[in-house]
Amino acid sequence: MQALTQRVKQVDRKPMTLLERIYLWNIVKGMFITFMHIFKKKPTIRYPEQKREFSPVFRGLHVLNRDEEGRENCTACGLCAVACPAEAITMEAAERLPNEEHLYREEKYAAKYEINMLRCIFCGLCEEACPKDAIYLSETFTPANFTRKNFIYGKPDLLIPNVKTESGEFAKAKGM
Amino acid sequence: MSDLLKITIDNITVEVPAGTTILNAARQIGGEVAPPAMCYYSKLADSGGKCRTCLVEVSKGSEKDPRPMPKLVASCRTTVMDGMEVKNITSPKVIDARNGVVEFLLINHPLDCPVCDQAGECDLQDLGYNHGKEGTRYEFKRRTFHKVDLGDYIQLHMTRCIMCFRCVFVADQLTEKREHGILDRGDHAQIATLIEKNLHNDFIGNVIDVCPVGALTDKTFRFKNRVWFTKPVDAHRNCSNPKCCGEAQLWMRGDEVFRVTARKDEWGEVKEASNGKTGWICNTCRFETKKAIDWTIEGPSVVNRHSVISQGHYVGVIKPTETFNAVMKGRDPKLLMDIHDESEVNKPNIDLSVLDRPAHSTDFN
């Protein structure tokens, strides 16, 4: 058959010589390559003690944002859920009661908000769609887990600490 | 001479009977030639002439008097003359004027679409999307009002109102006694019920359907769901009210009926019912029959595929045949996780749609 490209290399089908058959030379060659790697720079790091720097556009685990007064930004408009190509986001909205003004910024809020991390593909479209700056993709990985049910992230998992009532945790999360 | 008058709109000629308005002639052509309308409603007599979104340029008055009209005219109020030539989307003047009108309409309109229940089926949202500017030039405080409950089922959010008067015409023409109207003038004008009178009329629910913005909304649907997550289906029931057409659109999610509205045509107006009546529905149909069992469901409504409401409604899906039974010899597959065991959203035993008020934090405990 005629070769299709110039780079085709004909396989040598000749029977191996004695030197080739005992493989000794090839083993020495391979061991030498392995040995040389001891002196090379290591590409691996000791995770989790050492961590690599994230790219500025890294998209990790979601957080639900609060404003400066600790009120939830999310108003359950559903734009993140509609933008989500994996249909990972679901929510249920509720009306704010008169005594809940310190908890929620708008008159409508997400009473339930869930992200199914098994479905999520971390594309960041929810963050882009959000008109209220409520959802952000942070620089954290979704932690591994043993069961599927722990991957359904509800509001307690996603919300950032309240700056007013949980100031200690807020500072810790901020890295201060 | 025939009774039909010839009119050319954007170089498309149609023949319409005398007395037809330019807007209705343009709607006969259909498509983008028809000017948008915020206040005109073909099913309501005397409506129109208020919002100025339907402005068009008349480049030739008529066959007898070919002079162009000096100013842009409101097409919903101007009747057709024989040989008239009208420019709508082909005239840059019209587009420019319409952009200005949209800016004016949005002066006092709050940009709270994420909260508003009308979002997704809002005429002003569509209009603003097509004609609006990116930012606002308005530097003053927008006028705000407190929310008012009109009766048990309707909420009036005057902040969002654009003063189209449609709801007043509905109350005037459909119900026996009008109890609300416009108070004050100019910038202070507002829709109000005199002396906080509740509206107990049978057909007052139709003000929700005619409202082009989210000023009048259904309290039984308030904050329950976004329109694009619900699935519209056509349904009918035997309504005992003689004026009610009994044909409606149910906005469902699963088996839950979240909202009942009248059926709308391509111009966002109430459709003619199959029995010849205009498709207004009574309050019983709209607010009190919120179970699928109350209705005979005809099938999914046709939704424009460019509408956000059609998102996630996959049409013509061919589902692969289920092979579990054959492979498992009749045994049920072992589910690794039932989403309802873990998820707190859309619990099968909690029906938010049956509440006749918005859900509160107390409903989720």
Image (cartoon, rainbow, N blue to C red):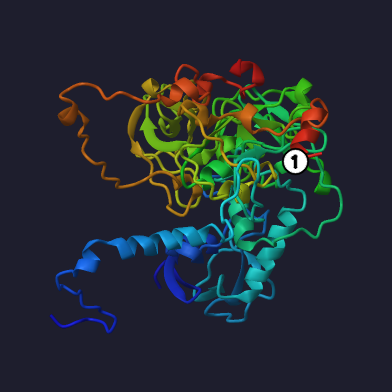
Q: Where, by quadrant of the figure, is residue B339 drawn?
A: top left
Describe the element under mark 1 as helix, strand or loop.
Answer: helix
- Residue name at image x 73 percent, y 46 percent: B110
Q: Is residue B182 visible?
A: no
Which percent across, then down, holds residue B184?
Answer: 82, 41
The residue indicated by pointer 1 is: B159
Which percent across, then down, holds residue B306?
Answer: 46, 54
A100 or B77, which is in the foreground? A100
- Residue name at image x 57 percent, y 43 percent: A80
Q: Residue furthest right?
A: B140
Q: Chain of mark 1?
A: B
Name which residue type carries label 1. Thr
* Disc 1 residue crowd, few under 14, some 14–19, many 20+, Cα 10 Å: some
Query: Is B136 located above or below residue B331 in the figure?
Result: below
Which percent across, then down, holds residue B324?
Answer: 21, 30
B341 or B188, which is in the foreground? B341
- Residue name at image x 30 percent, y 45 percent: B317
Instruction: Name the side, left or right, on which A71 lies relative to A35.
Output: right
Query: Is A103 located above or below residue A42 in the figure?
Result: above
Q: Is residue B88 visible?
A: yes
